[in-house]
Image (spheres, grey):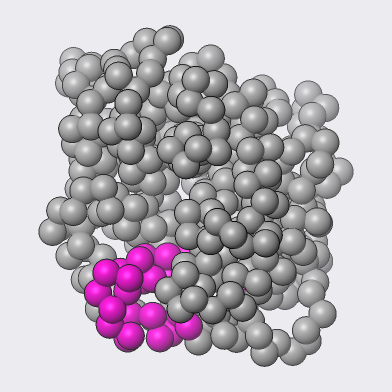
Amino acid sequence: MGINKIILVLIFCCVSFNMNATSISKESILKVAEHVFDWQQQHPTGVDLWDWEYGAYYSGLADLYKADTKIKYLKAMTDMGNQYNWSVRPRPYDANVLAISHMYLDLYSLIGDPRIIDKTVYCLDASFHRTPREPDVTFSGNRYWWSWWSWCDALFMAPPAFAKYAKITGEQKYLDKMDELWTITHNYLYDKNEHLYFRDDRYFQQKTPGGKKVFWSRGNGWVMGGLVKVLEVMPKDYNRRPFYEDLFKEMAAKIKQLQLKEGYWPGSLLDNSHYGGIESSGTAFYCYALAYGINSGLLDRAEYEVSVMKAWTILVENIDESGRLGYVQQVGDAPDRVTADDSEAYGSGAFLMAASEVYKLVSNK
C-alpha cells in the first residue's frame, strides 16, 4: 500500500476489530463519498446514463444528496435527467429500465415538475395492462425472461419505483402491484433454508467446486438494497409490511453470519474458495442494508454495528487515491473473478447508498 493510500485510509476510517460508530466522523464519511462521486463523474463507463448500471449510481447519488445537499450533486442529477428528457428505455415490462426512476421519483418529490416522472408513470401503469397476464418467472430457455421479475436483481431495479410512486400519489394500487410481483419472484427464487435468493432458476441445482449452493453476493445485495428502498417509503400500517420486515431481518441475520473477519463478503456467499477475495459491490449493498436496519430500528445496534463498521472500513480501503472504488465485480449474473482495477458505476452507487446510511448511523451515536 502506497503512502498516499495509507493517509487516505487513516483520514477516512479508523481500523479496529472492535470498531463502532464513534471510530469515524460524519465529515469523513461525506468527504470520501464526495471523492467517489467526483471520480465517477469524471470517468464515464460508456453505457447510456439511463441504463440500470447508472440507475443504481443515480439512486445512490439521490440518497447522498439527502444527507449532503451539495449543489453539484443536484446538478449532476438534473443534467442527466434533462439530457435524456427524463425518459426510461421503452421496455415497460423490463425491471431494469426502472432503476433510473429511483432518482427521478426522488427529485420529483423535491421539485414537483410532472415531466420528471411522466415516462416512469407510463411504465408503472403498463404493469396493469399486460398481455399475456399469466406470470412466467422462468429464466432458463425463456426468450422473454425480462417480461417478469425472473432474476433476483429485478427486486432492486423495479420495486422501489412502484413504492416511491405509491407514496407520492397515495394510491395503494402501485404498492399492491409491487407486492404481487415481488411475491411471485420470492416464491420461486428464495431458498427458505439458506435465507438467500438464487440469482435465477439456472442456479437451482448448481454447486460450487466445494459442493455448496451458488448464491451470488451482488445478487443478494441487489435484493437487500431493494428491500431498504421499499421499506423506507412503505406505510407503517400497510398490511403486507410485516412480510418485508421479516424477510429483511431474516436475510440480515444470514448476511451477518457470512461476513468474513476482514469485513467483506466474497462473490460466492457460501464458499469463499469459489472466486474468493474482496468484492466491493455486494459488500457495499450489505453495509447499506445493515446500517439502514439499525437506523430504522429493525436491527439491534449492539448486534450489527460492528458488522457495518468493518464493512465500511474495507470499502474505504478499496478506494484508491483518485477516488475509484476497486474490486467491483463486472457486469454479470454469478460469482466471478475481480481485481483491484475493476470498477463500475453501480459499485459507486452502492457505496454512496452505504455512505448515506453510515452517515445517519454516526450522526445518531
- Look at the image and give the residue range highlighted in magenta: 94-121
The residue under the point 53% across, 60% down is 234
Q: Is residue 179 above or below residue 253?
A: below
Q: Is residue 117 above or below residue 141?
A: below
115 left or right, relative to 294: left
* Residue found at the very far front of the displayed protein: 237
276 left or right, relative to 11: right
Whether residue 359 appears in magenta in the rendering, the answer is: no
Q: Nearer the viewer, residue 19 or 73?
A: 19
State how many labels appear: 0
Whether residue 120 appears in magenta in the rendering, the answer is: yes
Q: Is residue 193 above or below residue 99?
A: above
Q: Is residue 23 above or below residue 308?
A: above
Q: Nearer the viewer, residue 365 or 96?
A: 365
On the image, the x and y values in percent for residue 329 come to 50, 41
The residue under the point 43% across, 56% down is 56
314 left or right, relative to 97: left
Q: Nearer the viewer, residue 160 or 131?
A: 160
The residue under the point 39% across, 71% down is 105
* Residue found at the very far right of the displayed protein: 205
The residue under the point 74% across, 38% down is 195
Q: Is residue 273 visible?
A: yes
Q: Which quarter of the rendering shows the N terminus?
A: top left
On the image, the x and y values in percent for residue 325 come to 34, 37
Quarter of the rendering containing residue 253: top right
